[in-house]
Image (cartoon, rainbow, N blue to C red):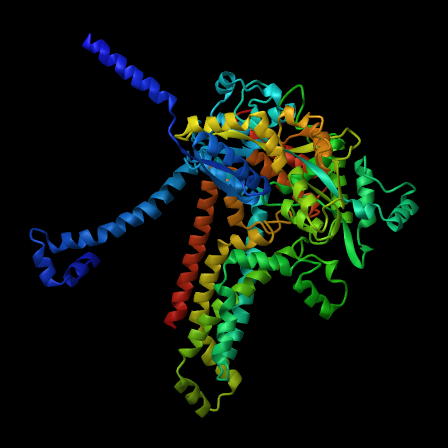
């Protein structure tokens, strides 16, 4: 016999408790317990989503609430999808997303691999490495602004120490070509430890017996790495990519502190642009359509990715 | 008879009650900056005289508009009094955020003719140039320039400048002279330190670069629209003269500002100037008392001058704010009492003494005013040449469009000045079309 989740919950309810509430069936008691959660979910997630979709077909502006709201069909969607500035914002977001993930995965995995080796002071180094991710993104944005300062910033001095030249000859956050990399570097510095921790969990979950068996079969270290370590850490790595991808898609505070989205629109990510449309320009209908487009994009990409992740896990 | 007696007693009680106003806890909202501290000090007198208690909600400038407009748009009751930015007046009036003050002014004998005309138009009127008042001018402010007088006076610097330009190094009267001076100081060694020309507004996120670039645009011939036909922008916003003004600002940024100053506004400019990095800084007049009091650059080491003239005239970007009563407040009577108290000449004079820029004619036209502070005359000269940004209810959309277009050209170096302004016209037309103005 197949039970529904609510019936399973009802069965799991302790007998004496069910008996105490006279006149109520087990199913009713189960509903009483889950109803607050369902109500909360509907109120906090589902209702705003439906409301946003509804607003996206209107010209509503929250700062002109006394003006008549007009239904304008797909006009907001059409304007967004044909706006070259929004496509530039999408490109900036894609650049940020791809490079932060690539760098964080490579460096995070390498650090985890090193930390996983037994050496003196291992725990101390782990603690030191994870410090950046404990800071507030706004604080990190602020102090990287100083690090990138051409006249007094440490970053320019370190670069010119190796390359020669005048430290004030380039500006990481004022140059259109360098600014996208400035935000990638700051985010990588902050969040690589997070990827490292996940990879470390993956590495430590591999039983030693597998490596011992490989040693018996005279597999080289290189071969062991590619046929044991990488495949067994891959699900963890993919999970880290998912987390970082979702987080960086909505990146806001660090970039606002560092560049304010400039120079021009070079580092204006979609979240910054959306916030400006919604809460600075007060174009509520337009920004609702923008939010729906981003939601569909992220939801679609995440669904495809989760399917791929499940396949990797099944292998 | 008995009924009549009861009515008389009740009426007497009511009349007596009306005369005794209950003490309220009033909240005044403004930006977090030096003048706000002066206002706290000034308001102690109001607390003493009225019995009301004053609380203050100050928000740093970069988040001020976001925070306070959110408050107003949501009908919040946090603020009873709002010292809102000049550009908010249209939205404040049309969206019902501010209480109209005409009747109150008439009843209390407060007349707008007693205030500097530019501040009345800029901070109080909506629609502009009509006698509909939504605020009392509270803090006059304008963009001006501060310079290192002590550097300018050094013989070796005077000599080097004369050798290069053929005339004495002096306070610039034109924007071209200003550029020459800033370029002259760029990367010059003074007291063993490399210094730079000028700190100018370049900030991207809020309103910075717009508040800076307009000082060049106005003086080169930029207009917000056809003076004969409002909202006709083509050929006025993007005229060849306006494009030349924008090119001027870019040249100034490219050749005469400190490296890395791509996102600077009031705070960064103050820091650069006080730390001796730059010879000149563009900034609102509110910083001048702080400059005078600074141990590094104050006490006669600094001088002040209004925004220099360009080929089409001499103008400066208006700053400053008016004080309004928030329509959602439950304590409007007490808030109006505050405005009545604040408008008094002796309170306005004290306001100036504490570092607040009074807009009352009786204060600024006092014979001793111009010499009362080293920057007082520059303030008066600057207030006489002001122009302001749009104050439409859609000002935020208009501002953000300009921020993007101008920053993209001046700082990022994309496109030309003409394409930037053409793009701006397109954006602004779209905003006005959406708003039903055209």
Image coords of residue A66 (percent x, y)? 43, 27
Do we see residue A117 in this rendering?
yes
Residue B337: where, in percent of width, then height?
47, 26
Q: Quadrant of residue B222?
A: top right
Looking at the image, residue A116 sits to the left or right of residue B266; the answer is: left
In the rendered view, would you say A245 is above or below B73?
A: below
Q: Is residue A80 visible?
A: no
User: Which residue is located at x 46 percent, y 34 percent?
Assistant: B72
Residue located 58% across and 32% down the image: B321
User: Is A240 or B69 nearer to us in this picture?
Assistant: B69
- Furthest toward the top, the residue is B1
Where residue B242 sits in the image (x, y, percent)? Answer: 73, 33
Residue A173 located left or right of residue A133: right
Is B126 situated above or below B208? above
**Residue at 67% across / 43% down in the picture?**
B201
Residue placed most toward the observer, A166 or A139 = A139
Figure label count: 0
Q: On screen, B106 above or below B265?
A: above
Pick the residue in front: A208 or B159.
Answer: B159
Q: In the image, residue B46 lies at what x, y percent? A: 49, 32
Q: Residue furthest front?
A: B48
* Image-based side of B214 in relation to A220, left or right: right
Q: Quadrant of the N terminus of chain A?
A: bottom left
Q: Quadrant of the C terminus of chain A?
A: bottom left
Report the front residue among B11 and A283. B11
Q: Where is A282 relative to B134, above or below?
A: below
């Amino acid at each position: 016999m197949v039970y529904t989740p609510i019936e399973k919950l009802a069965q799991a309810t302790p007998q004496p408790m069910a008996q105490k509430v006279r006149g109520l069936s087990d199913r009713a008691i189960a509903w009483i317990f889950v109803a607050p959660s369902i109500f909360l979910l509907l109120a906090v997630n589902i209702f705003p989503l439906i409301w946003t979709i509804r607003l996206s077909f209107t010209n509503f502006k929250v700062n002109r609430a006394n003006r008549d709201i007009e239904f304008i069909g797909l006009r907001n969607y059409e304007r967004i999808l044909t706006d070259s500035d929004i496509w530039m914002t999408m490109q900036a977001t894609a650049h940020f997303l791809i490079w932060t993930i690539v760098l964080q995965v490579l460096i995070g995995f390498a650090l985890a691999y090193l930390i996983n080796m037994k050496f003196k002071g291992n725990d101390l180094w782990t603690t030191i490495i994870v410090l950046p991710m404990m800071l507030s993104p706004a604080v990190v944005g602020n102090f990287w602004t100083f690090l990138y300062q051409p006249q007094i910033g440490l970053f320019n001095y370190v670069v010119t120490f190796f390359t020669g030249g005048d430290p004030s000859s380039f500006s990481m956050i004022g140059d259109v070509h360098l600014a996208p990399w400035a935000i990638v570097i700051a985010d990588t510095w902050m969040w690589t430890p997070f990827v490292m921790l996940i990879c470390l969990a993956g590495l430590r979950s591999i039983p030693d017996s597998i490596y011992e068996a490989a040693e018996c079969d005279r597999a080289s270290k290189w071969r062991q790495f590619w046929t044991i370590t990488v495949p067994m850490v891959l699900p963890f790595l993919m999970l880290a990519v998912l987390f970082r991808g979702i987080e960086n898609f909505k990146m806001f505070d660090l970039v606002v502190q560092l560049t304010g989205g400039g120079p021009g629109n070079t580092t204006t990510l979609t979240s910054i642009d959306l916030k400006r449309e919604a809460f600075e320009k007060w174009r509520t209908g337009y920004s609702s359509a923008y939010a729906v487009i981003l939601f569909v994009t992220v939801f679609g990409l995440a669904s495809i990715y989760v399917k791929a992740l499940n396949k990797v896990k099944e292998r | 008879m008995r009924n009549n007696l009861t009515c008389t007693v009740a009426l007497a009680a009511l009349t007596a009650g009306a005369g005794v106003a209950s003490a309220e806890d009033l909240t005044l909202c403004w930006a977090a900056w030096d003048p706000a501290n002066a206002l706290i000090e000034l308001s102690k007198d109001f607390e003493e005289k009225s019995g009301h208690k004053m609380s203050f909600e100050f928000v740093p400038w970069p988040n001020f508009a976001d925070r306070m407009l959110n408050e107003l748009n949501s009908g919040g009751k946090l603020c009873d009094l709002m010292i809102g930015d000049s550009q908010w007046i249209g939205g404040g009036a049309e969206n019902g955020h501010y209480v109209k003050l005409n009747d109150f002014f008439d009843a209390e004998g407060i007349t707008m003719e007693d205030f500097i005309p530019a501040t009345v138009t800029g901070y109080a009127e909506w629609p502009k140039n009509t006698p509909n008042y939504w605020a009392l001018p509270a803090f006059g402010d304008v963009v001006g320039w501060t310079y290192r007088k002590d550097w300018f006076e050094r013989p070796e610097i005077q000599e080097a400048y004369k050798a290069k330009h053929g005339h004495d190094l002096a306070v610039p009267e034109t924007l071209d002279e200003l550029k020459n001076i800033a370029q002259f100081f760029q990367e010059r060694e003074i007291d063993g330190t490399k210094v730079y020309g000028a700190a100018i507004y370049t900030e991207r996120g809020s309103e910075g670069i717009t508040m800076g670039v307009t000082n060049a645009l106005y003086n080169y011939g930029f207009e917000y629209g056809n003076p004969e036909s409002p909202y006709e922008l083509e050929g006025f916003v993007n005229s060849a003269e306006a494009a030349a003004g924008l090119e001027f600002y870019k040249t100034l940024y490219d050749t005469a500002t400190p490296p890395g100053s791509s996102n600077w506004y009031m705070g960064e400019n103050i820091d650069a100037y006080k730390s001796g990095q730059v010879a000149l800084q563009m900034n609102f007049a509110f910083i001048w008392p702080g400059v005078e009091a600074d141990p590094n650059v104050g006490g006669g080491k600094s001088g002040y001058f209004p925004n220099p003239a360009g080929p089409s005239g001499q103008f400066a970007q208006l700053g400053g704010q008016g004080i309004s009563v928030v329509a959602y407040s439950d304590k409007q009577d007490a808030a109006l009492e505050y405005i009545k108290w604040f408008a008094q000449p002796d309170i306005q004079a004290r306001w100036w003494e504490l570092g607040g820029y009074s807009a009352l004619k009786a204060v600024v036209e006092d014979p001793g005013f111009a010499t009362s502070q080293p920057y007082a005359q520059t303030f008066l000269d600057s207030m006489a040449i002001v122009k302001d940004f749009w104050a439409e209810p859609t000002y935020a959309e208009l501002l953000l469009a300009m921020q993007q277009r101008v920053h993209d050209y001046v700082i990022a170096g994309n496109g030309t000045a003409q394409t930037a302004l053409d793009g701006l016209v397109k954006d602004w037309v779209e905003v006005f079309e959406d708003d039903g103005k055209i």
